[in-house]
């Protein structure tokens, strides 16, 4: 396999592992070997480089084998995806939501069962500006975006949205903000100095008041109706 080039420069890859990742595992070593067929410039670390140095990498590959990505991606990974090319790898089919990843600007997902040929192909596609998702996920994501377009109003939608917002308590709004930023229940509890049980109670109450069926719908609702720029930095972690 020939090394890929972008803009006549050799590709530089950054592999973000988890502190639980076994870098001596056969499958991880196999994955790195595949990457070496793509580029000789590969950096592997459990921490991202400083923001000022991130543009030197053409693609970030994030190991999500130990990260909970079924509902929401971490705030750090989502923020990275808004600025850089990000590809999730080592994913389990039942523990990742492709639609959520796509809406978070992730460029694709590589599963633990993906063949070496398709891993290489997926990296090539992303480096060439394409996406590496199944067609169903892309269709669902586009449908979600279309439903959010402002030129398709519902006659009483503003009144409904205002009434839903008015029903929420100040503490429930704080919990929703943190949830929508990618924080887990324990992170929310630590940030607000409340118990995890209380966090769950607030979330279930918010489900009812906003007509949300799960955390994804509640996060999408929050992104439309509640400013999310005041989330404490302490919750933005994996």
Image (cartoon, rainbow, N blue to C red):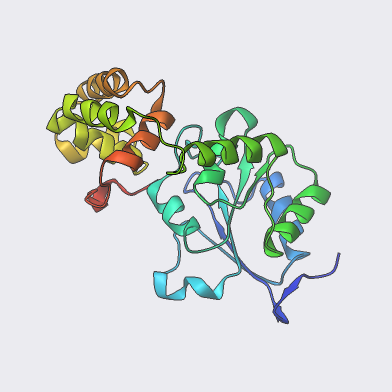
Against 194, is 230 above or below? below
**In front: 112, or 21?**
112
- Give percent across and percent down for residue 197: 23, 20
Where on the picture, by quarter, is residue 176? top left
Tell me, yes or no, if residue 189 can be seen here: no
Image: 164 above or below 121: above
Count of marks, rendered view: 0
Q: Residue at 27% of width from left, 47% of height from top?
A: 228
Split into 4 quadrants, where in the image is the N terminus? bottom right
Please identify the quadrant where the C terminus is shown. top left
Q: Position of residue 14 (x, y in %)?
A: 57, 64
Instruction: Give the camera-side residue of 115 and 136.
Output: 136
Side of 21 relative to 198 (left or right): right
Answer whether residue 218 is visible to the viewer in this image: yes
Which image quadrant for residue 12? Answer: bottom right
**What percent of the width, then of the height, locates residue 174?**
20, 37
Direction from residue 180 to residue 20 in the image, left or right: right
Q: Can you say whether 230 is above or below 169 in the image? A: below
Most foreground residue, 13 or 71: 71
Q: Residue lying farthest right? A: 1
Q: Is residue 198 left or right of residue 42?
A: left
Q: Residue furthest bottom?
A: 8
Q: Position of residue 165 (x, y in %)?
A: 22, 31
């Amino acid at each position: 396999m020939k090394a890929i080039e972008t803009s006549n420069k050799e590709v530089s890859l950054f592999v973000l592992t988890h502190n639980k990742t076994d870098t001596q595992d056969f499958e991880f070593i196999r994955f790195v070997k595949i990457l070496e067929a793509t580029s000789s410039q590969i950096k592997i670390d459990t921490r991202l480089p400083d923001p000022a140095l991130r543009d030197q990498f053409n693609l970030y590959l994030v190991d999500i084998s130990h990260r909970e990505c079924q509902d929401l991606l971490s705030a750090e990974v989502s923020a990275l995806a808004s600025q850089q090319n990000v590809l999730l790898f080592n994913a389990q089919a039942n523990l990742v939501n492709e639609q959520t990843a796509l809406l978070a600007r992730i460029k694709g997902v590589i599963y633990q069962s993906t063949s070496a040929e398709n891993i290489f192909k997926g990296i090539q596609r992303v480096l060439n500006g394409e996406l590496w998702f199944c067609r169903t996920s892309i269709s669902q994501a586009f449908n979600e975006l279309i439903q959010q377009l402002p030129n398709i109003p519902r006659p009483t939608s503003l009144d409904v949205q205002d009434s839903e917002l008015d029903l929420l308590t100040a503490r429930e709004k704080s919990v929703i903000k943190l949830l929508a930023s990618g924080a887990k229940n324990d992170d929310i509890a630590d940030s607000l100095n409340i118990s995890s049980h209380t966090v769950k109670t607030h979330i279930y109450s918010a489900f009812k008041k906003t007509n949300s069926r799960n955390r994804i719908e509640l996060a999408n609702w929050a992104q439309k109706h509640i400013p999310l720029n005041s989330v404490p930095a302490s919750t933005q972690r994996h």
